[in-house]
């Protein structure tokens, strides 16, 4: 029996919105330490480095889990894997509320990190239902799930102030458990997906599914994602503490400012896919990295007092980025980081339609590792330098390097593909209108040679 078109589209939409909702919940839990970590830091008297390690620990596990879960969902039922991830996350979050020492909290954070792998299971489920030509738009909707960080930033601070961080952890655990139960009963396996995991699969099958990871292009996608996603997650985790330290605000206000960074990013992640289709992924990546360079440069400046020698004596003034300007800058930065995430992931279903989960898992893993390494680096820099803005100084250096590397790689590709044609162009663009065939090669590096010595005899 063939299902009518309206039934097929209804099933596709059901799979997409269930996966998006589950990913939103998982992202909210994955970034829980961005809020409760602030109170834990004060209770235990942690250094900046110790705080960075605590909030980053879930990112490490979630990143590695993305590759492993990418293989699992290509072998076993997505419903089983998806619900299992949520259950493990729920148990870990609940046990976290009973931890009393820093090592135990690290262990709980380590186990909680598996919910970060929910993105891969969501991608796998959506890719089962959507044909290749429609998957990129479906993934744009799925990307809205990163706004789950805003759920934590908005609701967790008020609960923390009223009841303490342990109650917040328990409430988030209940949310994960409820999501697991909902997925188990509501998620429908695609007919092709339900046939997976049979005993006919050989032991070599999981390894064969990793074959696309041999392609260097996959790793280049991953390096781009390290910046656009890893730095985004790092700031999601770091901003509440940063705002409280720099602007002396309470945790509820700091959470609201962090939500201004994370909530629009989810919507921009969706809109980014449309921008890719209208303007191209390359142009969007240039926009993303260029705007990120400008924003991180501005945010890198600490408050300072200046004294200048004027004609009538010393001139003293104070300069700093106020909280309003800071909020506007991180809003723009978060939006363009989300555009960059869309630009990277648009490539995966096009070039690797049969290995979306595995390739997406690796790219997500590298991005997540950025979310793990950067908060720790932020803490180390803050402890060593005493400059709170050092986190943005590091991001400025990283994003600048990414922009330069991408531009060099693109120019190299263009010269390899069109080397002969490029050789016919003038040395300066101003000469293009009056540049003719007799001018080709003129003033180029081969044309400018030292004159032979003058014979004066």
Image (tube, helix red, strand yellow):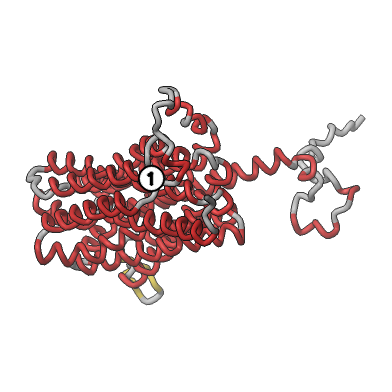
Q: How many marks?
A: 1
Q: Residue at x 18, y 55 (%)?
A: 174
Of residue 79 and residue 67, the one placed in the foreground of this image is 79
The part of the image, by quadrant, that contains residue 157 is bottom left
Where does the image place residue 163, in percent across and percent down from the top left?
Answer: 9, 63
Could you say whether the residue bearing mark 1 is in a helix, strand or loop? helix
Give the residue at mark 1: 121
Q: Is residue 95 above or below residue 139?
A: above
Work out which residue is located at the far front of the displayed protein and give it. Answer: 1
Of residue 334 and residue 199, the one placed in the foreground of this image is 199
Instruction: Describe residue 4's horizontal placement relative to residue 439 as left or right.
Output: left
Of residue 417 and residue 129, the one placed in the foreground of this image is 129
Label 1, residues with CA under 10 Å away: few <14, some 14-19, many ≥20: many
Where does the image place residue 292, in percent across and percent down from the top left?
Answer: 46, 57
Is any atom of residue 57 visible in this view? yes
Where does the image place residue 453, in percent across and percent down from the top left?
Answer: 84, 32
Instruction: Describe residue 279's horizontal placement relative to residue 56 as left or right.
Output: right
Work out which residue is located at the far bottom of the displayed protein and give it. Answer: 312
Q: Is residue 396 above or below residue 117?
A: below
Q: Residue at x 58, y 47 (%)?
A: 407
Q: Residue at x 76, y 45 (%)?
A: 422
Q: Residue at x 14, y 54 (%)?
A: 170
Work out which residue is located at the far top of the displayed protein and give it. Answer: 203
The part of the image, by quadrant, that contains residue 57 is top left
């Amino acid at each position: 029996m063939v299902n009518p078109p309206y039934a097929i589209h209804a099933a596709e939409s059901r799979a997409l919105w269930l996966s998006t909702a589950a990913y939103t919940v998982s992202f909210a839990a994955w970034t829980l330490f961005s809020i409760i970590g602030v109170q834990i830091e004060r209770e235990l008297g942690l250094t900046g480095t110790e705080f960075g390690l605590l909030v980053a620990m879930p990112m490490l596990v979630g990143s590695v889990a993305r590759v492993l879960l990418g293989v699992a969902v290509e072998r076993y039922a997505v419903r089983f894997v998806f619900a299992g991830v949520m259950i493990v996350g729920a148990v870990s979050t609940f046990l976290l509320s009973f931890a009393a020492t820093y090592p135990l909290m690290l262990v709980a954070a380590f186990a909680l990190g598996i919910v970060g792998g929910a993105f891969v299971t969501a991608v796998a489920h959506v890719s089962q239902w959507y044909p290749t030509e429609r998957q990129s738009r479906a993934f744009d909707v799925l990307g809205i799930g990163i706004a789950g960080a805003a759920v934590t930033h908005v609701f967790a601070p008020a609960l923390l102030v009223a009841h303490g961080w342990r109650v917040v952890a328990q409430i988030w655990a209940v949310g994960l458990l409820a999501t697991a139960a909902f997925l188990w009963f509501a998620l429908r396996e695609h007919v092709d997906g339900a046939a997976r995991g049979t005993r006919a699969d050989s032991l070599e099958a999981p390894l064969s599914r990793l074959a696309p990871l041999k392609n260097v292009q996959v790793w280049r996608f991953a390096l781009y994602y390290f910046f656009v996603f890893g730095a985004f997650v790092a700031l999601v985790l770091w901003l509440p503490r940063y705002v409280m330290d720099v602007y002396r605000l309470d945790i509820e206000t700091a959470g609201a400012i962090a939500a201004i960074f994370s909530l629009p990013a989810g919507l921009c992640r969706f809109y980014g896919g449309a921008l890719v289709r209208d303007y191209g992924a390359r142009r969007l990546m240039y926009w993303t990295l260029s705007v990120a360079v400008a924003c991180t440069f501005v945010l890198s400046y600490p408050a300072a007092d200046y004294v200048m020698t004027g004609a009538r004596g010393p001139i003293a003034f104070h300069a700093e980025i106020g909280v309003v300007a800071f909020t506007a800058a991180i809003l723009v930065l978060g939006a363009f980081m989300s555009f960059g995430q869309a630009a990277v992931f648009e490539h995966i279903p096009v070039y690797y339609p049969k290995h979306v989960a595995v390739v997406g898992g690796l790219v997500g893993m590298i991005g997540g590792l950025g979310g793990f390494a950067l908060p720790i680096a932020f803490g180390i820099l803050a402890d060593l330098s005493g400059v709170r803005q050092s986190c943005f100084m590091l991001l400025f250096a990283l994003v600048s390097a990414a922009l330069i590397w991408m531009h060099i790689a693109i120019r190299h590709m263009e010269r390899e593909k069109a080397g002969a044609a490029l050789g016919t162009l003038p040395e300066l663009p101003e000469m293009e209108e009056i540049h003719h065939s007799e001018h080709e090669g003129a003033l180029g590096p081969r044309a400018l040679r030292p004159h032979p010595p003058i014979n004066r005899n």
